[in-house]
Image (cartoon, rainbow, N blue to C red):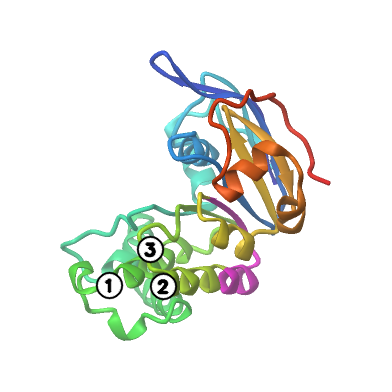
Amino acid sequence: MIKIEGLWKSFGATEVLRGLDLEIRDAETIVIIGRSGGGKSVLLKHLCGLLKPDKGKVLVEGVDIVPLDEQELTPIRKQFGFLFQSAALFDSMTLYDNVAFPLREERRPEAEIHKRVEESLTIVDLLQAQDKKPAELSGGMRKRAGLARAVVANPKYILYDEPTTGLDPIRADNINQLILRLHDQLHCTGVAVTHDMVSAYKIADRIALLHEGTIHVVGTPEEIQATQDPIVKQFITGIGDDTQEVQHGTATVH
């Protein structure tokens, strides 16, 4: 389980996270929605220690990772797989070598690497493309390749940063289906950030709205869709008054 308590983060004079609290349950997929530039990716990077908060705690399996140094963070980070928004593949490497990269960094035996890479590429239906370079892959294939690399080390947690951004509806739905399949096969905990409500409704067990630096509401997809909360309705419909006053805090949608 991951528990975030009173998280604050500023960049210069801009407060991005403002005392944020959130609990991420084991084996669930939670989707964090919110406006572009609202801090979703910033929050995601705090979960595995890529960013340090100004104040607050990030508890992973009961351990606060905020005060840990890079060496102490290493075993924690091995529990995480990360799908970056751009897939972040190495252009000079084949697909096979891209997926193998995290395991080679850990100096795993080559036989184990081969087995795990083939398994991961099979899960995302890319085994036949293992000798291709990223430039030879479509946008959807690059996303799937990024997913293969994210799961190759059998992580407990998978972090998805805008997994469907830049994809047409058909390819986006393929990624959503793949995320659901990974969850079923690997029994991992997923945390996705997105502003794509079609994706959020499809993959989420719960949805959390990040608004004005805090988690405004948390609920199931059905609860989010049915809510009468004006801030939630404004976001999911795209219709509303940008000047509307906001009340901070966390609530459960009913």
The stretch in magenta equals: 180-193
Closer-to-camera residue (18/126): 18
In this picture, residue 147 sits left or right of residue 226: left
> Label 1 near label 2: C-beta < 8 Å?
yes
Q: Quadrant of residue 94?
A: bottom left
Disc 2 or disc 1, which is closer to the eye? 2
Label located before the other in sequence (2 or 1): 1
Q: Is residue 116 above or below residue 32?
A: below
Q: CA distance from mark 3 to mark 2?
A: 14 Å
Label located before the other in sequence (3 or 1): 1
What mark, if any, has residue 83 been given in the picture?
A: none
Q: Position of residue 72 (x, y in %)?
A: 50, 35
Q: Secondary structure at mark 1?
A: loop
Closer-to-camera residue (160/70): 160
Label located before the other in sequence (3 or 2): 3
- Residue extending farthest to the right is 254
Residue under numbered circle 1: 138
What mark, if any, has residue 146 been given in the picture?
A: 3
Q: Identify the residue at image location x=20%, y=71%.
A: 133
Q: Is residue 233 above or below residue 190?
A: above
